[in-house]
Amino acid sequence: MGRLQGKIAVVTGAADGIGHAISEAMATEGAHVFAGDIDDRKGEALVAELKAKGLAADYVHCDVSAEADIRNLIQTAVDKGGRLDILVNNAAIAIGGMPVYEMTDDQWHRLIAVNLTSVFRGCKFALPHMIRQKGGAIINMASAQGHVGLDGWTAYAGAKGAVMSMTRQMAVEFGPHNVRINSISPGTIATPMNDKIVAEQGDHIARAWVKMHPIGRIGKTSEIAEAAVYLASDAAGFTTGIDLRVDGGLTAAPRFVPDLV
Ligand SMILES: NC(=O)c1ccc[n+]([C@@H]2O[C@H](COP(=O)([O-])OP(=O)(O)OC[C@H]3O[C@@H](n4cnc5c(N)ncnc54)[C@H](O)[C@@H]3O)[C@@H](O)[C@H]2O)c1
């Protein structure tokens, strides 16, 4: 029996990268995954792949910056699955790599809408179902960037810091309803998000990332998925309000980026 057997899970930003790995891992562990994304082609492909393996999954178009889309994603899961056990607020975008004085207001508002307001809305729509059921697990995707500084990422880091702070706050508030709320802070993980940053800024960034992680490499999406499965499972029944750093030691180490200086 899988560690998430029979559970109903919603994952945002599920079509690629970390969200894809989480959706696959949760479905493999027995959950019915409702995968939301803006990339319909990749989202449908993920669900087809999971169904071909005999796993339970549905794709729902969901732009996390649109309130109605998040409401619809969660309501679809509840209507089809009869309940909601797991919400993974994963979708985010990377706008950065520039000093704060070069960031436009439009870039700031876009980043906050996709990376932070989405988490507020996901929790807002999921919590009433979880409270009624007297149980549930929410996992918010934070980042090592919410713990340590890196030139050019002020807005992204601000959103991730707020995600962690809101996670703690809600864990305290909804613990009495047996709803557990935790975050994960990945280090640098091999995903399309980072491929795009390397394409824009150059290969030296990729070399510096390896050196920044004491473990000597960047992470795999499966390593974040494993952490998400654990936090969603009954094995983590006494764990709430934490930020789980899955970062190869990045935030334990003094800053060391020789290729950038
Ligand atoms: N990759 C890393 O190194 C890293 C490190 C720390 C934290 N994170 C966090 O992990 C999460 C996933 O990152 P990733 O690297 O897998 O990203 P990614 O860019 O590789 O994939 C993100 C997915 O989200 C989708 N998406 C983008 N905008 C969306 C929107 N408005 N609504 C719905 N879906 C949308 C994309 O289509 C894509 O499928 C993010 O919260 C990110 O901040 C990533």
Image: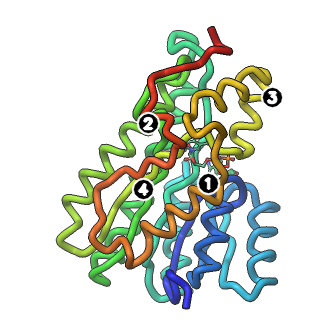
Q: Which residue is mark 2?
A: 159
In the picture of the structure, the residue carrying the numbered disc 1 is: 63
Label 4, label 1: how far apart the Cα atoms are:
12 Å
Q: Nearer the viewer, residue 124 or 26?
A: 26
* Image position, residue 48 (x, y; %): 80, 76
Tag 2–tag 4 contact (CB < 8 Å): no
In the image, what residue occupies the spot 65% across and 41% down? 218
In depth, the one of 62 and 157 nearer the eye is: 157
- Callout in the foreground (2, 1): 2
Circle 2 sits in a helix, a strand or a loop, which is it?
helix
Q: Does residue 130 lie above or below 16 as drawn?
A: below
Q: Earlier in the sequence, mark 1 or mark 3?
A: 1
Q: Residue 33 is drawn in which quadrant?
A: bottom right
**Residue at the spot 82% in from the left edge and 61% down from the top edge:** 41
Mark 3 element type? helix
Determine which residue is flagged by label 4. 121
Q: Are marks 4 and 1 in contact (CB under 8 Å)?
A: no
Q: Which residue is mark 3?
A: 199
The yes-or-no answer for disc 1 within 8 Å of ligand 1 is: yes
Residue depth check, mark 3 versus mark 4: number of the one nearer the observer: 3
Reading the chain from its start, which is encountered first: label 4 or label 1? 1
How far across and how far down the image is residue 25, in percent?
62, 71
